């Protein structure tokens, strides 16, 4: 069962939440996006720190670029297995209709322009952080937490929720 379905079961069936929000960076950004895509009736919004490639992306250029980077630097490792599984088994995100916030940290690898993110997500918040990188939750926890809280506050107002 895909990870996003496990998260949905956890939130709804085990923890009893009818509505919830999700956050993810790196691999978790894809899981959170798929969660919002698959269960818009339950997901208030997603807050991500990365955006995957659109389904209409040129798969040959991407493949050659990725293969070259790993081949020439001899940097491939078995830690990439979850990325392979998500790409092959789950597939790309087509469109996430729930409100989405994107937080970009300048030292992170993924720096998609807003127009790229809007191809696959309903982007309502796009924040370029002043500092931080791939491990933002460790490097800049205050910045990340503040952005998530500010995003959730906008959802509270839109949904008439009190939390």
Image (spheres, rainbow, N blue to C red):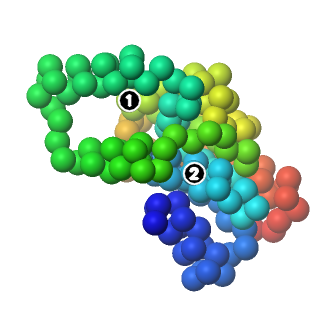
What is the quadrant of residue 42 in the picture? bottom right
Quarter containing the C terminus: bottom right
Tell me which residue sits at (11%, 28%) in the image. Answer: 74
Whichever of labels 1 and 2 marks the residue nearer the N terminus, that label is 2
Task: Work out whether residue 92 or residue 106 is closer to the camera in this orientation and state it.
Answer: 92
Q: How far from the left and from the top, in percent, is residue 97? A: 73, 45
Report how far apart the C-alphas of labels 1 and 2 lie in the structure. Answer: 21 Å
Residue name at image x 85 percent, y 53 percent: 158
Horizontal and vertical percent position of residue 69: 23, 22
Looking at the picture, tell me which residue is in the foreground, 147 or 61: 61
Of all residues shown, which one is farthest toward the left?
A: 74
Q: Nearer the viewer, mark 1 or mark 2?
A: 2
Spot occupied by residue 95 in the image (x, y as percentages of width and height): 66, 40
- Does residue 132 appear in the picture of this structure? yes
Q: What label does residue 34 carry, if any?
A: 2
> Could you classify mark 1 by the number of other residues whose Cα lies within 10 Å: few (under 14), some (14-19), or many (20 or more)?
few
Circle 1: element type: loop
Q: Which residue is mark 1?
A: 109
Q: Can I make out residue 107 in this image? A: no
Q: Is residue 138 left or right of residue 67?
A: right
Which residue is found at the position 36% from the left and 49% from the top?
Answer: 85
Residue for point 83% across, 65% down? 161
* In the rendered image, the vertical position of residue 48 relative to residue 58, given as above or below: below
On screen, residue 75 versus residue 110, left or right, reads left
Q: Secondary structure at mark 2?
A: helix
């Amino acid at each position: 069962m895909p990870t996003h379905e496990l998260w949905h079961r956890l939130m709804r069936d085990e923890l009893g939440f009818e509505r919830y929000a999700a956050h993810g960076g790196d691999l978790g950004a894809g899981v959170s996006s798929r969660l919002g895509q698959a269960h818009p009736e339950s997901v208030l919004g997603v807050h991500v720190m990365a955006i995957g490639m659109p389904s209409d992306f040129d798969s040959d250029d991407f493949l050659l670029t990725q293969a070259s980077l790993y081949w020439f630097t001899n940097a491939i490792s078995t830690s990439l297995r979850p990325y392979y599984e998500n790409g092959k088994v789950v597939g790309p995100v087509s469109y996430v209709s729930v409100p989405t916030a994107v937080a970009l940290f300048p030292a992170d690898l993924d720096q998609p322009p807003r127009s790229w993110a809007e191809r696959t997500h309903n982007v309502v918040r796009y924040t370029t952080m002043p500092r931080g990188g791939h491990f933002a939750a460790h490097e800049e926890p205050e910045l990340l937490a503040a952005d998530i809280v500010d995003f959730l506050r906008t959802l509270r107002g839109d949904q008439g929720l009190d939390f």
